[in-house]
Image (cartoon, rainbow, N blue to C red):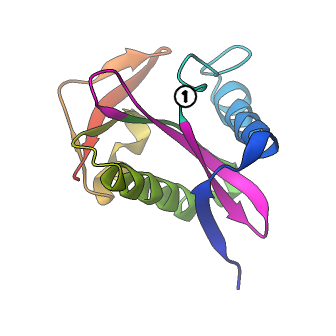
Amino acid sequence: MSVLQCREAAGPEELRACYEIRRTVFVEEQKLFELDDRDEHDAHAIHYVACLHDRIIGTVRIYRDSDGVWWGGRLAVLKRYRGRAGRLLIQACVERVRREGGLCFRAHVQHDNIAFFETLQWTSVGKPLLICGRPHQLMEAIL
């Protein structure tokens, strides 16, 4: 039986693994970005990893903006491990935001993933918008 664990990334080596998974998913596979998906939020975000047999197979980041709203983003799981790992990463982040006393936790979710987030009790806010040329829906977790 394999044990899948989700936890906060520990150290620069694990953070590099997060960025590599994101590059694989968002640059190579989905072609959302030309070279790299890193942005100004990475420096202050809390990065989570999904590990299977001590191998990082997925990642997501969360951060609080200047208005106190928590944001999740850059959820990326290696193709052969999708499903359960993404679910556990999202659940771990919702729990973290709750522990931090967050009142609002949002994410821009790619259109194809809306139903998945709805199974985790996230709700749509407003109308879809284009991000990197792809439809996304602003969604909010029930805290």
In the picture of the structure, the residue carrying the numbered disc 1 is: 44
What's the residue at 66%, 49% (across, down)?
A: 9
In the image: residue 8, left or right of residue 63: right
Residue 60, by quadrant, is top right
**In front: 63, or 24?**
63
In the image: residue 108, left or right of residue 59: left
- As helix, strand or loop, the secondary structure at mark 1 comes to loop
Write down the region rendered in magenta.
46-70
**In front: 125, or 141?**
141
Q: Position of residue 95 (x, y in %)?
A: 38, 58
What's the residue at 50%, 62% (across, down)?
A: 88
Farthest residue, direction front: 100
Quadrant containing the N terminus is: bottom right
The prevailing secondary structure element of the residues shown in magenta is strand
**In front: 9, or 53?**
9
* 100 falls in the magenta region: no
What's the residue at 65%, 50% (across, down)?
A: 58
Q: Position of residue 33 (x, y in %)?
A: 64, 17
Q: Is residue 132 visible?
A: yes
Vertical relation: 67 (above or below) 59? above
Q: Is residue 17 visible?
A: no
Residue 121, by quadrant, is bottom left
What's the residue at 72%, 34% (across, down)?
A: 19
Name the amino acid, label 1: His
